[in-house]
Image (cartoon, helix red, strand yellow):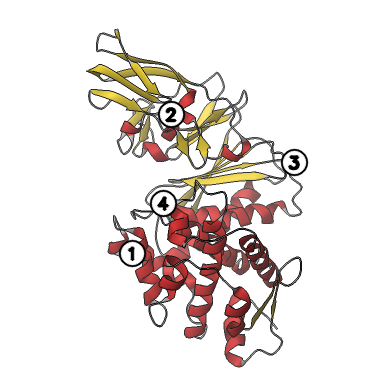
Amino acid sequence: MPQPVREWSFRNAYAGALNLGERIDNFEVLNTAQEVLPVRKITAGEYRTDQPAQLIRYTINASSRAASEVAHVTWLSEDYGCLMLADLLPIVFDGLELRIELKLPPKWSAQFSGNTDDNGRVIVRKPEETVFVVGPTLKKLSQLINGQTLNLALIGKWKLSDETIMGSAQRVFAHYLKLTEHKLSEEPLLIIMPYRFSGGNSWRAQTRGANVVLAIDPSASFRNWKGQLSVIFTHEFLHLWVPNSLGLKGDYDWFFEGFTLYEALITALQLKLINFQEYLDTLARVYDSYLSYPNDLSLIEASERRWTSSFPLVYDKGMLVALQYDLMVRTESEGKSSLSDLYPRLLNLAQTQANDANTAIIGLLDSSVSGSEFSSRYVEKKGSLDLTSSLKQYGIIVDSSGQRTMVKIDRNLDKKQKTVLRTLGYTQ
C-alpha cells in the first residue's frame, strides 16, 4: 500500500455489473515481517483491521461474467482474458502511479496502453483506467496517424485480415483527430477479442481511459463485417475524447452517451458507412424505442439514475436532443456550422477542465443557438419530445401512426431546408 491504512475497499459495482466485491477471497493483512494480522470482513469487498498495515494479499475469482459485463469487468477463461485494475485493486490505489508485475502462464503475453520500466514492470499512472488483455496468441499492430499512434491488440481468427481491421480503425480515428483538433495525451489501444454471445447480442464494447475494449462474436452473421466494425468504432473512438480527455465532473451521461450516439451516426454518414436513408431509419428506430417507455425525467435526472433505471432514456432522448440541436445550428448558420463544431471548443476551453460538466456543456450549447432556452427546454426540464411536430420546420416528416415510425423528407422543401439537409447528405 502507498501508506499504512486500516480499511480496504473494493468496487462492488461498475457499469451495471454488481456484486464485484464477492469475488474477493482469502484477504489477508500483513506487517513488515510478513506476519498475518487479524482482519474483519465488514461486507463484500470491505475489510478492516485495528493495526495500520501496508501489505495485503488476496485472491479473486475471475471466471467469466455475464455477457453484458464482458467489456466492463475483469474476467479470465482458459484461453485468454481481460484484466481491469479498477476491480482488481482496492480503491485507495486510484490516481496513484504504480508498478505492476504480471506473472502469466507459459506462452501467454499481455498487451496494454503504456510503457514498462527497466525491470519490465508496467508503469501505471491511472489504475482505475488500466486494462490488460492477456492470452497465448496475442497480435499487436501499430499505426501512426497524423502524429498520433493507434495500437491494435487482436486475439483469435477473424473474417477480416488484421490489416483490414486496422485500416477501418485508422479511418475513423483520423476523422476524430481532425474533428476534435485535439491530440490524445496517451497512445490509445484498441482491444478486439472473441466472445460467444447468445440471445441476440453479437458484441459489447467499452472505452476506458485510453483503451477501447471490444468483445465480439466471431460467428456473428453481419452482412458487412468491415462496415459493422467501422460503425462500432465511430461511437467508441469518440469516447477517447469525450468524456475520457475531459476533466469535467458530475453526471453528464446525456451528453457523452446521447450526443455521442448522434455524432457517431453523422460520422458514419460522412464516411459513407451508411447512406442517408439508413440515417433516417436509425432515427426512426431510436424514436420508437423512446416512445416505448415512460419518460418523466429530465436528461440531467436520467444521467443521475442511469445505472438504476431500466429504461435507456440517456441514450434515446439524448440522441434525439442532439438531432434537434444539430438541425437548429445548421439552420441558423445556413449549413455552415453543426453539432460537430462543438467538440473542438469543448476540448480546448480551459473552463471545461475540472469543472462542473453540465454547467460547462450547457453554456456551450446555448451560446451556439439564438436565445438561451435550448438547454432549459431539452436538457434541464422534464417533458417528452414530439418529433412529429418539431422536425416539420426542417422538412423532415415523422409518422408514428403505424406500428413503426417512418422518417422521410418532405417533397416540397424550400431552398433553405434543401441547403441544410444537403449538408447532412441528402442528395435529391
Q: Residue at x 36, y 55 (%)?
A: 246
C-alpha span from label 2 to label 4: 21 Å
Callout 3, which amino acid?
Answer: Ser
Label 2, on which residue? 88
The image's mark for residue 219 is 3
Q: SS at mark 3?
A: loop
Residue 414 seen by the camera: yes
Label 1, on which residue? 359
The residue lying toward the viewer, choosing from 98 and 280, is: 280
In the rendered structure, are the residues bearing label 2 and label 3 in contact, judged by CB atoms less than 8 Å apart?
no
C-alpha span from label 1 to label 4: 18 Å
What quarter of the picture does the N terminus occupy? top left
Up-down relation of residue 34 to residue 385 (above or below) = above
Q: SS at mark 1?
A: helix
Q: Residues within 10 Å of mark 4 (few under 14, many from 20)?
A: some
C-alpha span from label 2 to label 3: 31 Å
Q: Residue at x 50, y 57 (%)?
A: 257
In the rendered structure, are the residues bearing label 1 and label 2 in contact, judged by CB atoms less than 8 Å apart?
no
Callout 2, which amino acid?
Answer: Leu
The image's mark for residue 244 is 4
Callout 4, which amino acid?
Answer: Asn
Give the percent coordinates (x, y) of residue 103: 46, 20
